[in-house]
Image (cartoon, helix red, strand yellow):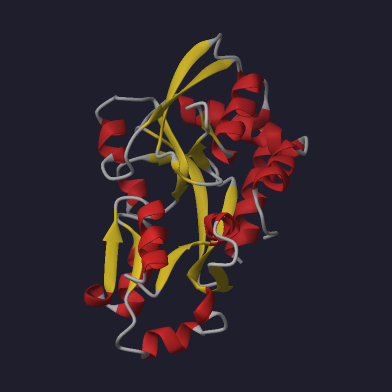
C-alpha cells in the first residue's frame, strides 16, 4: 500500500502544476550526503561522490536550472548540519518519517526501500524468526537510521551493536562480531555483491520506507525539486537510474 501511495504522489506531481517549468537561474545548491551507503552514494576511486542519489539530483538540476555541489558529511549529525545552514539540502537515502518531518521538509518520495538482514554464507537460509528467537544473536546497524530503530524493536537494545557507517557494520559481520546487519535491501544487495561468496541477503521485506530529498523547514527549494522530480519520473529517467544502480529488482 505504501509503495502505491508514494508512486501515486510522484505521478500526481507530474500531472499537475507542480511539474510546470522551473528555472533557478544557475543557482548553486550545496547537498550534504553520507558517501558510505552504496549504491545511493559512495566515493569513487578518483575521490568523487557517485551513486543513485547523485545522478538523481544532477538530473533534477538539469531540468530546473541549478548547479549541484555535493559535500561529504557524516550521517550522525547530518540533519543538525542542515539546520545550521552548512548545506542547502540533503540527498542521502533518507527515509521519510513523521518524527523527522517535524524538523525538516521532504520532497515527494522518489523510491521505496524495504528492510533486510545480511548474514554470512554459513547462515544462509536462516529466518528472521530464528534470529530473533536465538538470544545469542546480536545484529548491527548504522546509528540513527530507521534500520537501527527496527532492529532495536525486534532484538532489543542489548542485542544491537550500532556503527557510524554501514560499511563498519558489514565489516563487523565479516569479522563475526555480529550475526546479521539490518539494512535496506538495495544497499544490502550492493554489499552482498561486493563480498560475493561471503555474505547473503535471504531475509527481506521486513518493512517499507519511502525515501525523500531533505530541506530546511520553509525552504523555497522544495517546490522546485518536487517539480524536477516529477519531470524525471514522467520521462522515464527515474526508472532508468534505478535500473543502472540497483543490483536487485524491487
Furthest-left residue in this view: 158
Q: Give the quadrant of residue 57.
A: top right
Say which quadrant the C terminus sits in: bottom right
Residue shown at the point (57%, 56%) measured from the top left: 186
Relative side of 230 to 161, left or right: right
The image shows residue 207 at horizontal and vertical percentages of 50, 69
Residue 106, above or below 208: above
- As drawn, the residue found furthest toward the top would be 25
Does residue 116 sit above or below 86 in this rendering? below
The answer to whether one can see residue 116 in this image is yes
Instruction: Report the number of numbered marks.
Output: 0
Report the residue at 52% width, 32% height from top: 45
Q: Percent x, y for residue 166?
A: 40, 54
**Residue in the picture at 50% in, 27% down:** 48
Task: Using the rendered image of the protein, determine whether residue 15 is visible from the camera's viewpoint.
Answer: no
Give the residue drawn at x 61%, y 30%.
Answer: 227
Which residue is at the front of the view, 146 or 105? 146
Q: Residue 91 in the image: x percent, y percent?
A: 47, 37
101 on left or right of 233: left
Query: Could you say which is closer to the camera, residue 32 or residue 187?
Result: 187
Quarter of the view holding residue 241: top right
Q: Is 77 or 173 nearer to us in this picture? A: 173
Which image quarter is the N terminus in? bottom right
Q: Quadrant of residue 153?
A: bottom left
Amino acid at each position: 500500500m505504501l509503495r502505491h501511495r508514494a508512486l501515486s504522489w510522484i505521478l500526481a506531481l507530474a500531472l499537475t502544476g507542480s511539474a510546470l517549468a522551473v528555472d533557478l537561474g544557475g543557482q548553486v545548491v550545496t547537498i550534504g550526503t553520507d558517501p558510505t551507503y552504496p549504491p545511493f552514494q559512495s566515493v569513487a576511486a578518483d575521490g568523487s561522490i557517485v551513486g543513485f542519489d547523485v545522478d538523481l539530483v544532477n538530473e533534477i538540476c538539469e531540468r530546473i536550472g541549478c548547479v549541484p555541489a555535493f559535500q561529504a558529511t557524516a550521517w550522525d549529525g547530518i540533519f543538525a548540519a542542515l539546520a545550521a545552514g552548512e548545506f542547502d539540502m540533503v540527498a542521502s537515502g533518507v527515509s521519510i518519517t513523521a518524527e523527522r518531518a517535524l524538523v525538516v521538509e521532504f520532497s515527494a518520495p522518489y523510491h521505496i526501500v524495504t528492510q533486510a538482514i545480511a548474514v554470512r554464507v554459513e547462515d544462509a537460509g536462516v529466518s528472521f524468526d530464528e534470529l530473533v528467537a536465538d538470544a545469542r544473536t546480536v545484529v548491527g546497524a548504522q546509528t540513527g537510521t530507521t534500520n537501527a530503530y527496527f532492529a532495536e524493536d525486534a532484538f532489543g537494545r542489548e542485542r544491537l551493536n550500532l556503527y557510524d557507517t554501514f560499511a563498519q557494520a558489514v565489516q563487523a559481520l565479516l569479522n563475526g562480531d555480529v550475526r546479521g546487519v539490518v539494512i535496506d535491501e538495495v544497499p544490502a544487495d550492493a554489499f552482498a555483491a561486493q563480498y560475493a561468496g561471503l555474505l547473503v541477503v535471504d531475509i527481506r521485506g521486513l518493512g517499507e520506507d519511502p525515501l525523500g530529498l531533505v530541506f530546511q523547514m520553509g525552504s523555497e527549494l522544495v517546490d522546485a525539486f518536487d517539480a524536477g522530480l516529477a519531470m524525471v519520473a514522467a520521462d522515464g529517467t527515474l526508472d532508468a537510474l534505478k535500473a543502472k544502480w540497483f543490483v536487485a529488482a524491487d
